[in-house]
Amino acid sequence: MNANTVEGIIFLAFVMILYAVYFVKGDKKKVKDASKKSVKVFIQNSVRIYAVFVIIAILQKFISPEAVSSFLLRFNGLTGILAGALAGSVMMGPGATSYPIGQYLLSNGAGYAIVAAFLFTWVGIGVISIPYEFKFLGKEFTLLRNGFTFVAAIFIALLMGVLL
């Protein structure tokens, strides 16, 4: 078992103990109502998260790293940075899954700026998960966060291009 699984089990056990203590010492009706509501929210969110993961998996299955790389290798300069940022925004995923693509791009002549834009937006922006983010964080926050992240990605990519 990895550390995340152990931490998750510990956290779940802690929550269950709190529910049990409150059920015994507190208002049983409130505990039942809270339990019903939390199960409902858990199921709703699980379905949404599962849908996001399915979409990401489909994209990553049908849009291979080689396809992304060959697409990005066609560009350079500011156009390449924008293409890298857009591709990373759409592909999205954990950082570790984007490193092989970044390595492939670098070994085939892509500039550091394009790779930096791609990696930054891959982790920082999730076009697919925007509706989910709207629901919990609101449209204004979501749009501002993704907009600022995109601008920051361009800025950091330009800076990386100058420095490296």
Image: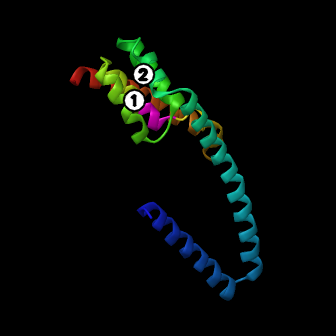
For residue 37, side relative to residue 6 (left or right): right
Q: Which of these two is toward me, 13 or 60?
A: 60
Instruction: Kindly identify the residue that appears in the image at 32 percent across and 18 percent down.
Output: 110
Under mark 2, the amino acid is: Ser
Q: Using the image, tell me which numbered label, if any, was put on residue 69.
A: 2
How far is mark 2 from mark 1, CA to CA? 7 Å
x and y percent of residue 148 in the render?
46, 31
Quadrant for residue 158, please give it.
top left
Q: How is the image coloured?
A: rainbow
Q: Which of these two is toward me, 97 or 15?
A: 97
Contact, CB < 8 Å: mark 2 with mark 1? yes
x and y percent of residue 146 in the render?
51, 33
x and y percent of residue 27 in the render?
72, 82
From which residue to which does the magenta span run?
120-125
Does the magenta portion include 119?
no
Q: Earlier in the sequence, mark 2 or mark 1?
A: 2
Check disc 2: other Cα within 10 Å, few if <14, some if 14-19, many if 20+: many
Residue 79 to residue 51: above or below: above
Is residue 112 among what the camera can see?
no
Residue 114 to residue 1: above or below: above
Check disc 1: other Cα within 10 Å, few if <14, some if 14-19, many if 20+: many
Quadrant for residue 96, please give it.
top left
For residue 123, side relative to residue 54 (left or right): left
Under mark 1, the amino acid is: Ile
Instruction: Kindly identify the residue that appears in the image at 65 percent across and 38 percent down.
Output: 131
Tag 2, which secondary structure? helix
Q: Which image quarter holds the C terminus?
A: top left
Q: Using the image, tell me which numbered label, if any, was put on residue 101.
A: 1
Is residue 54 among what the camera can see?
yes
Tag 1, which secondary structure? helix
x and y percent of residue 36 in the render?
75, 68
Q: Which image quarter holds the N terminus?
A: bottom left
